Amino acid sequence: MHSSITPVILCGGSGTRLWPRSRAARPKPFLPLVGETTLFAATLDRAAPDHGFAAPIIVTGARHVDHVTAQIGPREATIIVEPSAQNTAAAIALAALVLPGDALMLVCP
């Protein structure tokens, strides 16, 4: 039995929803939309181990790995790189495959 919740942070995308600010090379999770912190970094802070969460699993595309690793800093995390973008359900399934069957996930799109 696991005592903590594992945050699964889905980040990436095509960068079309907030165009022209977001682009394919830097979609909205990696932009500071409110203040100076990116949406991704703010999610990492909210789901931190000092708030009772396990180390996060981050699901992203190959083109966003550099953004993810730069913003993780010294935090412990598992990064899963999607072999191809298949939307939310497939990304959640990838994360579920690396967790034990009785794990609790908090999915953070």
Image (tube, grey):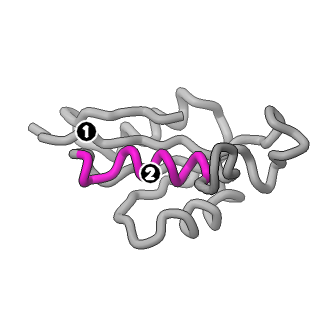
Image point 83% across, 48% down: which residue? 23
The residue identified by callout 2 is 44
The residue identified by callout 1 is 5
- Nearer to the camera, 77 or 84: 77
The kind of residue on which mark 2 rests is Leu
Q: Nearer the viewer, mark 2 or mark 1?
A: 2
- Residue 83, horizontal then vertical, whole percent: 62, 49
Bounds of the magenta segment: 38-51
Q: Is residue 105 left or right of residue 19?
A: left
- Whether residue 58 appears in magenta in the rendering, the answer is no
- Residue 22, horizontal then vertical, whole percent: 81, 46
Q: Residue furthest right?
A: 20
- At mark 1, the secondary structure is strand
Image point 24% across, 53% down: which residue? 50
Image point 52% across, 47% down: which residue? 59
The vertical placement of 51 against 106, above or below, is below
The mark that comes first in sequence, 2 or 1, is 1
Query: Label 1: few (<14), some or many (≥20) within 10 Å?
Result: some
- Nearer to the camera, 54 or 93: 54
